Amino acid sequence: MQIMIHYGDPQFPNDVFVPHFYPEHLVDLGETRMNYAMAGPEDAPALLLVPGQTESWWGYEPAMRLLEDRFRLYAVDLRGQGRSSRTPGRYTIDNMGNDLVRFVQIVIGRPVIVCGLSSGGVQSAWLSAFAPPGLIRAALYEDPPLFGAEVRPSRGHNLHGSAVSLIFGAFAKYLGDQWSIGDWPGFVREVKTTMPAVLAARPYDPATPTQMLKEYDPEWARRTLDGTLFAGCDHARMLAQVKVPVLMTHHYRGIDTESGLFVGALSDEQADRVGELIRGTGQRYECQSFPAMGHMMHMQDPVLYAQVVSDWVATLD
């Protein structure tokens, strides 16, 4: 059952959202209602676009305009982001993965190639391993924090050794679950005065949150920090069960000299381990390295992103 957006939903104040180029829709998945946008010919190969944490579906909008002549595109808001349902106490990678399985079954209705960024890239990995047979054709992991987002990873640094953990901690402290605290000026002050320069340089406006953060439930950040998000999903065990061809893009990574914290999604050591595990399943695996690229290629260089996706899909059977 599909539901058109209505602005009177008490969960979403009318002044939170802004219009976008593509129409938005809601589908009832049971526990959640998932917001999404579509573009492209109905008979073209289907691509499912999964944003990263703090990102709404429309982060893909520039890339969608470049891809819609070749693909049937479905860009979604995960639970707790955009116009999709907030689910206090229920933010886990497994719950979100099952949301996406239902979405593919109900809305798309045919096998799909899944492309996800960051946490959405881990979600792509989840689908490539755990989705029902025949549902996923192939998976693109765009700069995913595999191992690096775990509290106790089997390879390399953990989440608390990464600079982004400081941002997530400030989200939890100053914004609160479901924006229950909402001290945005306090959050910006914390970033600008106490964090390493690599984080303090972020262009946060003290007067107002960015549009995507307005649409984000900060409980996501707290659940990431305390390990709840991946508690039931060990990354190594997941990758050892991948059942489809995979492309991973690996972007900027390094150690911040001021704080000693890792900056980026995953290290070279962790990326190598991803390849070892997927190749061990017998599936085709490719990693493309973009060490000068920021975390969000599809937003920062949509032309390059569209080229990477198109060229890779053209090589699939």
Image (tube, rainbow, N blue to C red):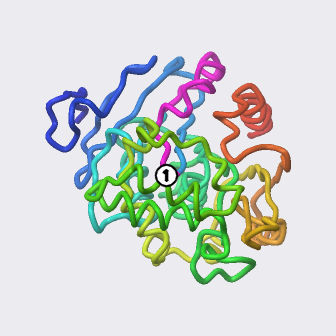
Q: Which region of the structure is painted magenta?
A: 53-74
User: x, y (%) of residue 69?
Assistant: 62, 16
Between residue 257 and residue 222, name the one nearer to us.
257
Indicate left or right for 24 with 171 as reference: left
Indicate left or right for 272 with 218 as reference: right
Between residue 77 and residue 166, name the one nearer to us.
166
Q: Indicate yes or no whether the magenta region holds residue 161.
A: no
User: x, y (%) of residue 37?
Assistant: 42, 28
Q: What residue is drawn where x is 28% and y is 52%?
A: 86
Between residue 190 and residue 134, name the one nearer to us.
190
Q: What residue is drawn where x is 60% and y is 19%?
A: 65
What residue does disc 1 label? 188
Q: What residue is drawn where x is 42% and y is 69%?
A: 223
Disc 1, SS:
helix
Indicate left or right for 154 with 206 as reference: right
Classify mark 1: residues with Cα within 10 Å, few (<14), some (14-19) or many (20+).
Answer: many
User: x, y (%) of residue 142?
Assistant: 68, 48
Please identify the quadrant where the N terminus is shown.
top left
Eyeballing the image, is 165 above or below 84? Answer: below
The three-letter code of the residue at mark 1 reads Val
Location of residue 119 (image quadrant): bottom right
Eyeballing the image, is 52 above or below 239? Answer: above
